[in-house]
C-alpha cells in the first residue's frame, strides 16, 4: 500500500512538473474558469501518460515547493464533473493528505488520474470557458496545452512512475508514527484506533454527546493511517459511527434552522469496507430530505444577511446579536437555496463572494462557510 504523504514528498523531490505530475497552489471549482483549468490538466495528464497513474498535487507553492495546504475537499462527486465534460474520461480520485507541519484544518490534496482507455484519447465533450468541444490536451514539459488533432504518445514514464510509487510504500514504522502523531494531535477529542483485516489502521476522534440513547460526534477527524489520508473532517456537523469487523460506517447529520430552532438532519451515509485482499472500498449514499421552513421568517433572515454583509464590507462594528447572526449567515443562505427562493436573493452567489470577508471578520463564521459550501457541493452534485 502506498503512503500518500511519502508519495507527495517523492513527487516534490522530483525535478519538476512533467508529463505524469503537476502541482498547484489551489483549485477553484466555484467558477467555469476554475473547472475548465482543472479539466484541462486532468485531460492532458491522462493523454500524456496513458499507461500509468498521473498525479496533481494541490496546496504547494510553485516557486519553492513549500507546503501551504488547502481546506479539506470532499471528492465524493468529482468523477461526476469529469464524466460530464470529458469524452473517454479517466478515473480520478482526490485524497486529503495530512502533514504534521500544517494547521489542523489544512491538508495537501492529491489528485490521482488513471486513463480509462489506453488506445482512445481523452477530449472535451462540450464547451467550457474558452475551450471548445472536441479539444484534446497534452503535456509539453510542465505545461498542459490544447491540440488541434490527435496526439502521438511516446510514453517513457512507466519505469519512472513505478520507481516513485515503489519508494512510497508504507512500512510498520510509518504506520506507528502515524498513529502516535494522530493521538497527539487529537488528545482533546478522545482519539481511538482500530485495526481491520490485520492490516488497515483507522484512527478517529471527536467530541461525543449522548442524545436519546445515541452517541453523536462533532469536530470529527477520521484518518486511514496506512495511507495518511483524511477520510472525513468536519468542524460543525454531527455524525454517528457504526463499527463492525470489516467496516466503518459514518452517518453525517447537517445542522439547519432559522432563529433558535435548529435541528440535525441526516445528510450522507459513508461506508468504508475493508477486504481480505488488502484493498478497501468507499461507498457513499445521500439520505438527505430537505426540511421545509416558514417562508416569511426565512425572507426576514435573508434580508438580515444582506444587512450584515453590508456592515462588514464597510468595516462597521457588529453588535453581539449581529455577531451570532453572522455565524449563522452561511447556513441561512443554504436554507434559502433548499427552499427554492435563492434566485430571488442571489444568496449562493453572495455567499461565495463573502468568503474573504467572513475569513477576515470571524473564524467561526468562516468555518461555518466552509462546511456549508461542502454540504452545498454534495447536494448540487446529487
Image (cartoon, rainbow, N blue to C red):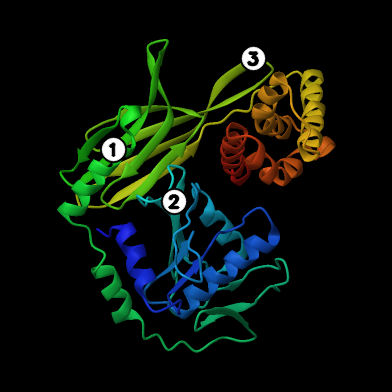
Secondary structure under the numbered disc 1 in the rendered image: helix
Give left or right: position of 11 versus 121.
left
Residue 91, above or below 286 = below
Name the residue carrying label 2.
107
Crowd around label 2: few <14 · some 14–19 · many ≥20 (10 Å): many
Q: Position of residue 329 (x, y in %)?
A: 69, 30
**Which one is closest to the eye, mark 3 or mark 1?**
1
Label placed on residue 348:
none
Q: Position of residue 160 (x, y in %)?
A: 31, 79
In terms of depth relative to the viewer, which is nearer, 377 or 59? Answer: 59
Task: Report if residue 366 is visible in the image.
Answer: yes
Lower sequence index among marks 2 and 3 = 2
Q: Position of residue 253 (x, y in %)?
A: 50, 27
In terms of depth relative to the viewer, which is nearer, 102 or 367? Answer: 102
Q: What residue sits 59% from the left and 71% below the top?
A: 40
Label placed on residue 184:
1
Name the residue carrying label 3.
261
Amino acid at each position: 500500500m502506498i503512503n500518500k504523504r511519502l508519495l507527495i514528498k517523492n513527487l516534490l523531490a522530483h525535478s519538476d512538473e512533467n508529463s505524469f505530475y503537476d502541482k498547484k497552489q489551489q483549485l477553484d471549482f466555484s467558477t467555469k474558469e476554475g473547472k475548465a483549468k482543472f479539466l484541462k490538466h486532468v485531460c492532458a495528464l491522462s493523454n500524456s501518460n496513458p499507461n500509468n497513474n498521473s498525479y496533481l498535487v494541490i496546496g504547494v507553492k510553485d516557486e519553492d515547493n513549500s507546503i501551504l495546504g488547502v481546506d479539506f475537499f470532499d471528492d465524493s462527486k468529482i468523477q461526476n464533473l469529469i464524466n460530464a465534460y470529458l469524452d473517454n474520461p479517466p478515473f480520478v480520485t482526490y485524497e486529503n493528505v495530512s502533514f504534521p507541519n500544517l494547521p489542523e484544518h489544512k491538508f495537501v490534496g492529491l489528485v490521482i488520474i488513471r486513463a480509462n482507455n489506453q488506445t482512445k484519447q481523452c477530449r472535451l465533450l462540450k464547451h467550457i470557458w474558452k475551450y471548445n468541444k472536441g479539444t484534446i490536451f497534452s503535456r509539453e514539459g510542465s505545461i498542459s496545452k490544447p491540440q488541434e488533432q490527435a496526439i502521438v504518445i511516446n510514453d517513457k514514464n512507466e519505469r519512472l512512475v513505478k520507481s516513485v510509487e515503489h519508494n512510497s510504500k508504507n512500512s510498520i514504522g510509518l504506520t506507528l508514527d502515524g498513529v502516535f502523531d494522530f493521538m497527539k494531535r487529537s488528545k482533546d477529542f478522545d482519539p481511538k484506533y482500530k485495526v481491520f483485516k490485520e492490516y488497515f489502521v483507522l484512527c478517529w476522534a471527536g467530541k461525543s454527546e449522548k442524545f436519546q440513547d445515541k452517541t453523536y460526534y462533532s469536530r470529527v477527524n477520521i484518518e486511514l493511517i496506512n495511507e495518511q489520508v483524511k477520510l472525513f473532517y468536519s468542524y460543525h456537523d454531527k455524525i454517528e459511527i457504526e463499527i463492525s469487523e470489516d467496516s466503518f460506517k459514518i452517518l453525517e447529520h447537517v445542522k439547519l434552522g432559522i432563529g433558535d430552532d435548529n435541528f440535525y438532519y441526516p445528510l450522507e451515509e459513508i461506508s468504508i469496507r475493508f477486504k481480505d485482499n488488502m484493498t478497501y472500498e468507499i461507498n457513499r449514499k445521500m439520505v438527505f430530505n430537505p426540511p421545509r421552513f416558514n417562508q416569511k421568517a426565512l425572507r426576514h433572515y435573508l434580508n438580515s444577511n444582506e444587512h450584515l454583509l453590508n456592515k462588514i464590507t464597510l468595516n462597521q462594528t457588529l453588535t453581539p446579536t449581529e455577531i451570532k447572526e453572522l455565524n449563522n449567515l452561511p447556513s441561512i443562505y443554504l436554507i434559502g437555496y433548499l427552499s427554492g427562493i435563492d434566485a430571488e436573493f442571489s444568496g449562493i452567489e453572495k455567499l461565495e463572494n463573502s468568503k474573504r470577508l467572513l475569513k477576515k471578520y470571524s473564524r467561526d463564521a468562516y468555518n461555518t462557510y466552509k462546511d456549508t459550501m461542502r454540504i452545498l457541493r454534495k447536494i448540487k452534485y446529487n
